[in-house]
Image: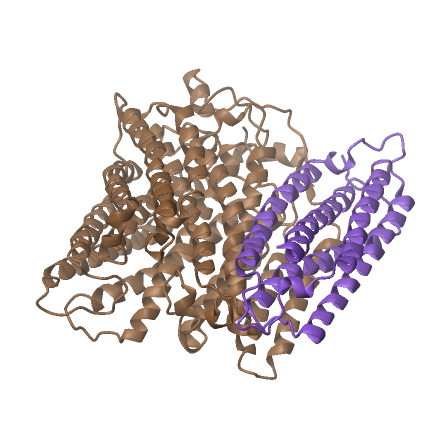
Amino acid sequence: MQSDERFTDATWPASPEKATLEGKNKYLGFWLFLGGETVLFASLFATYLALKDKVPNGDAALAKDLFELPLTFVATMLLLTSSLTSVYAMYHMKNNHFKQMQAWLVITVALGFAFLGLEIYEFNHYVHEYHHTFTSSAFGSAFYTLVGFHGGHVAFGLMWIISLMVRNARRGLNLYNAPKFYVASLYWHFIDVVWVFIFTVVYLMGMVG
Amino acid sequence: MSTYANKKGFGATIWDYLTTVDHKKIAILYLISGGLFFVIGGLEAMFIRIQLAIPNNDFVSAGFYNEILTMHGTTMIFLAAMPLVFAVMNAVVPLQIGARDVAFPFLNSLGFWLFFFGGIFLNLSWFLGGAPDAGWTSYASLSLHSEGHGIDFYVLGLQISGLGTLIAGINFLVTIINMRTPGMTYMRMPLFTWSTFVVSALILFAFPPLTVGLVLMMFDRMFGSNFFDVAAGGNTIIWEHLFWIFGHPEVYILILPAFGIFSEIFATFSRKRLFGYSSMVFATVLIGFLGFMVWAHHMFTTGLGPIANAIFAVATMAIAVPTGIKIFNWIFTMWGGSVKFTVPMLYAVAFIPTFTMGGVTGIMLASAPADYQYHDSYFVVAHFHYVIVGGVVLGLLAGINFYWPKMFGTMLNEKLGQITFWTFLIGFHLTFFIQHFLGLMGMPRRVFTFLDNQGLNTGNMISTVGAFLMAFGVLVMVINIIITSVKNEKVGNDPWGDGRTLEWAIPSPPPFYNFKQLPLVRGLDPYWVEKMEGKTEMTPAEPLGDIHMPNSSILPLTIAFGLFVAAFGALYNMDDKTWTLPIIIVGLLITFGSMLIRSVKDDHGYHIHKEDLMDDKDKGGKA
């Protein structure tokens, strides 16, 4: 089967991301990669929990002084919604509706950028209002590393989805690029799940614990 | 870009290897570079033994001793044992499961080049102001205070090569799950493929904690963070945990493939199917699982408390059970078999008592109260050399001898192989057996000299003599390789005569597409099954048709090279030099630019046409 052949709605397979051997391999390989990423973030979470509120002196800001739930709530909603819109994009991918898929991906990317903007504002706020920096304490190092690794993943995901959209803008879907869109959306969901844990462990537990 | 066309000439061959995505050629690349690093690590070992041959020796200075000791461990684990294991995996696993290549040929090449550039980067430290000197474990309390850039080379080099290992692990998992030929069920997979499968899962879950540990160390040393700086609230024990959560599975990552190789060799040269196949599979999986539960036995003296120590001690001892199952199964495989003592079989037979001795000292070390006595003494050094050299290195030597004809199409000389075997084995026991006693007598590890009149002189001298014997054995092996390569007497499909698995059903070396028609597997040891029915080749599972092959590419090399360049920028960034930031940016541009090219440029591979395959009749490759 030529993986770049054109399809009609009738010939488009039900799971285009797994219709070729290459697609199947990508699909499985990416799930396994996400397994490795899970361990990576688990290590960062463990480090953060070990170093939470570990500061050199009494003047340094602690978790309960820093975090404000309204801001992180908005950030959470933005990212959760972007995960939903990427689901819509994949729904249209599976139905061979290229235009709708691109439209939902544009919305996903826009929400991702909004989230990233809020995160930059938040970091900036901590640095200038509380002198809570990457180098000020072990707590600061652990906080910016964990949340920053997540932010880096968001930025990489945005670049990835944009490259895919631009590259395939004029040629539409085929069995060669369908798995690429699919694994990019898997990655995006993974980022979202990690954020759910960050919201819980860093922000909620930071406010109460 | 295809390698399908016949190219000739030295430059073309080099270009072919730089761009290859063929698992058999990548295996050769791993073998050559792993062998090179093995020699470097071996030279470092010789320096250590020369320095310790007599008391109060001044062959090397204390500081330089720390560097060679650190680099010996780091090189042997990350840059010699790992790539040599990957060499055998790449050469054999796709053939054993009846696949034409791995699942991700491009990533296979990327994994190699990342490892290679990481290893080169780490070793360049010798010429650029000094190597890392905080031991291969690089505990934060030591390494944060290490002068110069040695530790930075360690941190950056291992990040790059670790990424390569992770990629290779994912690749083998997907290959084994998705690419098996019809009839090759999980419980018909050869034991080496099974151990590769389990090891790849270990890699997937063990390498990310190492990466995180290295990133934290990099941030602390280069960017002023405070993870391990106690004065700013940090905690150095975090490094110990992250390192050993990786480090303990890592030793199983090394030993399980050796177990797999030995399982193949025992069955082949006893001319009997492996005893207790399913219990072997079960034991392999169980060792892999338990391997993640025991990391704190490296930290008994850290002070985690009696409860933690007790739990980890018991978990550690539990690993002896599946390992014991394996030892007995190997012995029972030989029992009643018609055993042929070829060089690989000699290694396999010698491995059993040697490794068992390492296992016994392992149980001794696992008992936490006793470990307070053994900790940081030569007893520990003796233990881990018995399991790593007596297990992994003997396994690799056996595997290289066993699979050499499959990889290169010619046999290694048996006489010279026996000389290597005996000198290496006797040298090994001379070097390390005595170290148990040196340790019990109180000789601490990692110290550059010892005093006279403490009863340590004779033992250390014996140990050094043994090391020279091992070096001689390796030298004979190199000579063996050169002589047989020059002679280059071609062998057929099944040079040992008793091959059981699919790789022995195709030519040596196999054609680049491996199987002209995918073979049908009708039982465990599929080639043996066919032989027993009087056939000489496998039954095909598909009609002759076009074969889809991947294109070769230079991009894996450039992606890895970009990180290599960026690492230099990051390394010198802490010295407040102005040129470092541009270097980092250029390096990352090369890497991400290459990734972008890979992403936007379609790569559909190419097809070998049926008609061309029919012309190739004499070349074989028929399943």
Looking at this rendering, what residue extends furthest in the top direction? B533
Give the brown chain's letter. Answer: B
Examine the rendering and report whether any part of residue B534 can be seen.
yes
Image quadrant holding the C terminus of chain B, namely top right
Quadrant of residue B616 within the rendered picture: top right
Answer with left or right where residue B221 lies relative to residue B367: right
The x and y percentages for residue A45 are 58, 54
Relative to residue B442, is residue B249 depicted above or below?
above
Relative to residue B304, is residue B93 depicted above or below?
above
The x and y percentages for residue B46 are 26, 63
Answer with left or right where residue A208 lies relative to residue B253: right
Relative to residue B297, is residue B319 depicted above or below?
above
Rendered colour, chain A: purple
Answer with left or right where residue B373 lies relative to residue A166: left
Of B141 and B125, the residue lying toward us: B141
Of B112 and B26, the residue lying toward us: B112
The x and y percentages for residue B435 are 19, 54
Answer with left or right where residue B484 lies relative to residue B589: left
Of B584 and B396, the residue lying toward us: B584
Identified at 75% across, 50% down, the residue is B602
